[in-house]
Image: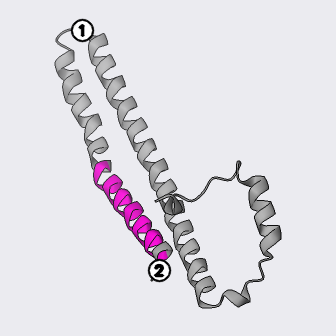
């Protein structure tokens, strides 16, 4: 395994670790609504609006937290799939570079023209 493939493997491992951390943190947002209900009951001693405010904050924070985790899980899933695909294509290229017909001059010109707009893969950054 060469250095670029090792970078892809370590990046895939990092993404999977982040995804697993999100899965573990998701349960904390499940506890927010019952905690808000209990705190709202105590808030009833002060005023009904305090209780309504506590419930509203609890529901909003739980909803936003679950939404953010859902979006990050989706993003990590896409990044993991793309990194696997890139690593597979790199391995195929390393195995048989003559199968890939890449005109060097045209490729360099295209890269130079679109380099300022193209977002490089995070695995290559490291």
Q: Residue furthest top?
A: 47
Q: Earlier in the sequence, mark 2 or mark 1?
A: 2
Where residue 10 appears, as percent x and y from the top left, is: 40, 68
Using the image as rendered, state which of residue 37 and residue 3 is in the foreground.
3
**Residue 59 figure quarter:** top left
Which quadrant: the N terminus? Answer: bottom left
Q: Which mark is residue 8?
A: none
Are there few (<14), some (14-19), or many (20+) residues within 10 Å of tag 2? few
Q: Please say whether residue 33 is one of the residues in the magenta stretch.
A: no
For the residue labelled by badge 2, is the local secondary structure a helix, a strand or a loop? loop
**Is residue 75 positioned above or below 54 on the image?**
below
Picture residue at 49% right of the left edge, 65% below the top:
80
Q: Is residue 5 left or right of residue 13?
A: right
Where residue 74 appears, as percent x and y from the top left, is: 50, 55
Where residue 95 appears, as percent x and y from the top left, is: 59, 90
Using the image as rendered, state which of residue 24 and residue 96 is in the foreground.
96
For the residue labelled by badge 1, is the local secondary structure a helix, a strand or a loop? loop
**Is residue 120 positioned above or below 12 on the image?**
above
Location of mark 1 (residue):
47
Q: Which mark is residue 2?
A: 2
Picture residue at 77% right of the left edge, 74% below the top:
104
Q: Please say whether residue 19 is one of the residues in the magenta stretch.
A: yes
**Residue 78 figure quarter:** bottom right
The CA distance from mark 2 to mark 1 is 66 Å
**Residue 66 figure quarter:** top left
Q: Residues in magenta?
A: 5-25
Magenta segment, principal secondary structure? helix
Q: Is residue 118 left or right of residue 67?
A: right
Where residue 64 appears, as percent x and y from the top left, is: 42, 36
């Amino acid at each position: 395994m060469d250095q670029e493939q090792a970078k892809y493997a370590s990046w895939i491992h990092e993404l999977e670790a982040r995804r697993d951390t999100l899965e573990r943190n998701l349960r904390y947002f499940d506890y927010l609504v019952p905690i808000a209900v209990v705190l709202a009951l105590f808030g009833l001693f002060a005023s009904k609006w305090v209780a309504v405010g506590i419930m509203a904050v609890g529901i909003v924070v739980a909803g936003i937290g679950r939404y953010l985790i859902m979006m990050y899980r989706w993003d990590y899933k896409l990044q993991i799939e793309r990194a696997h695909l890139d690593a597979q294509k790199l391995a195929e290229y390393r195995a048989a570079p003559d199968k890939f017909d890449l005109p060097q001059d045209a490729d360099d010109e295209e890269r130079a023209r679109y380099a300022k707009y193209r977002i490089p893969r995070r695995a290559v950054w490291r």
